[in-house]
Amino acid sequence: MIQQLLEIKGLRAYYRTLVGVVRAVDGVSLTIKRGEIFGIAGESGCGKSTLAKATLRLLKSPGYIHEGSILFEGRDLMSLNEENLRKLRWSQIAYIPQSSMNSLNPVMRIENQIMDAILAHENWSKDKARERALQLIRMVGLPERVLRMYPHELSGGMKQRCVIATAIALSPKLIVADEPTTALDVVIQRGILQALREIKETLHASIMLITHDMAVHAEIVDRLMVMYAGKVVELGDIHHIFKDPLHPYVKMLISAIPTIEERREIKGMPGRPPSLLNPPSGCRFYPRCPYAMKKCSQEEPKLKEVSPGHFVACHLYEGW
Amino acid sequence: MSEKPPLLEVKNLTKRFLLGGIFKKRYLTAVEDISFRIPGDKPNITTLAGESGSGKTTIARLVLGLISPTYGEILYKGRNVQEMLKHHRLTYIKEVQAVFQDPYEVYNPFYTIDRFLKIPIKKFKLAKSENDARKLIEEVLEAVGLTSERVLGKYPYQLSGGEAQRVAIARALLLRPTLLVADEPVSMIDASLRAEILNVLLNLKKNYGMSILFITHDLSVAYYLSDNIIMLNLGRITEMGDVKRVINNPLHPYVQELIKSIPIPNPERRWNEKINFSELKEHIVVRRGCPFFERCSHPMEKCKEIMPELVEVEPNHWVACHAITKL
């Protein structure tokens, strides 16, 4: 069995607009191993959600995949037709989109919604599907009676758990979760993250966790990839990145988080990410970078492995 | 000894909203019997913290006079805010300013930033000449870490969220308010720009002597910024006092649960115990007794019946919990 569950190579996902092409994801490569939680961090507009959608080939017009390959267990998703993709999604790769807790059908009991999802993909009897729904609802830590309830009777956190239960109904190997806890209160957030980790263990699945919240990443992911303006700037073990961040942007991102651990001064960074319509040549972070050199404005830094498994795209680490 | 009155004093504040109902009126009690003070002797940042539905924004809107209280009163420098709004509206508005969550919402997208900053100058006659006005604008922009070249002449959509929020703070600063009510001003802003705004607020306190009533759901932000913190749960104060005392040594079971759930940005210190949360019960509101009763890990018979009073258990650290105050 190959170690890599998902392998993305040189992915470029763009949006066509009236004023030009927006390069939201511009040459991203990554691998997700079996059984790991892979985190993707970055600020709004860095391309993390586009990357998630592109991974499932769910990008809708005006978005499109310009080039790149997406290998799932060695199969190239780019060469699959829509019918085969549909079979693969949900059964193999589950997707929990942003604010999906509001996507439950308000006039349908939770049980029927979960069963519908199962029956759309599997040729099961209704009883078998019902039994599975019960199993799932327990797996996400909800009591049985939730099955008979309607979405309006549930709190935000419970709805999110139902969405997760539906997503994992067919025991997928990969769960792509886009900001699954944003807009939830911290206590509920902790419950959801706890549930996700348990599900991962039970199903032996991998999770691609997308969130802007670095503290959430620190809490649960195994490896982290940080994006800036459509590019990967740093990728590595979460412990390494927090202990010794290499890219100036990642350094800043970590020093900008307030924490109740200690009351230290936090520092932000002026400026804003470049427009993805006409990104500057060279490094995209260079206009905001405190260590910018002449070279940075001309030549784009390549993602380079500076220590085993720790990659960074920055000219400062040229000689390493 | 004539002590200076508190800058803001909230006394037994209750706000009920009418939910409708054709034959029988139904009410939602958003905040109930809230009392706290922001001291007037030196600039202070007080944070109202709580989860969604805890009533924090309702309190902010009451303080700003956008809605009026059902019971109780709010005193600004010893004067009733409702009265002030009737008779000295401009004075109150000038001294108590606000910034809100969505940084773009306060702008009219058809006009440039210049107009946005000039309106209060005209309305409150802050400058004698065009030249004075320009100087004033430059000064407040500098105070929030912006330059006039960067923002003047621009339209709102040309600013980043962080810049738009800082311009909104700059406009409030034009009036040199004594109190700034900031309702979740950084929750829609990315991390790199959020830190900048928090530092701007700290500078306003330091350099302009401004006090801030800061509203947030993010306790890490509250810890960084504030002197005092007020923890709300379902419209009631559960714990309040010095921010270090409350966050480092929470006494109320609700606050303890909350603080245990904050993700720490340090992968070496992860959550290692599994905790069970009674999410299911979060919507059951007990009107008599402690609002946290249903979710509490050590409920007592008494808690069901009697609402615990806020008691000062150590200097500037108040808790409303029968289990703590019986000791």
Image (tube, coloured by chain):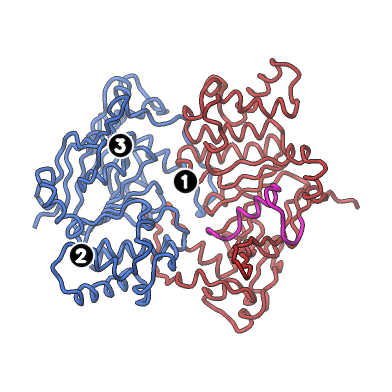
Chain colours: A blue, B red
Chain name for mark 1? A
> Disc 1 and disc 2: Cα gap in Å?
35 Å
The amino acid on which the numbered mark 3 sits, given as a three-letter code, is Val
* Residue B298 sits in quarter: bottom right
Residues tagged by mark 2 and mark 3 found on one chain of the structure:
yes
Crowding at dot 1, Cα within 10 Å, few <14 / some 14-19 / many 20+, comes out as many
Please name the residue shown 60% across and 68% down the image: B251
Q: Give the residue number, with chain letter if any, for mark 3.
A: A233
- Front residue (pair A32, A245): A32
The disc label shown at residue A34, or none: none
Asked if the residue at tag 3 contacts the one at tag 1, i.e. Cβ–Cβ closer than 8 Å, the answer is no
SS for dot 2: loop
Horizontal side of residue B229 vs A29, given as left or right? right
Start and end of the magenta stretch?
A: B51-73
Please name the residue shown 59% across and 82% down the image: B300
The amino acid on which the numbered mark 2 sits, given as a three-letter code, is Ser
Q: Is residue B16 above or below residue A138?
A: above
Mark 2 or 3, closer to the camera: 2
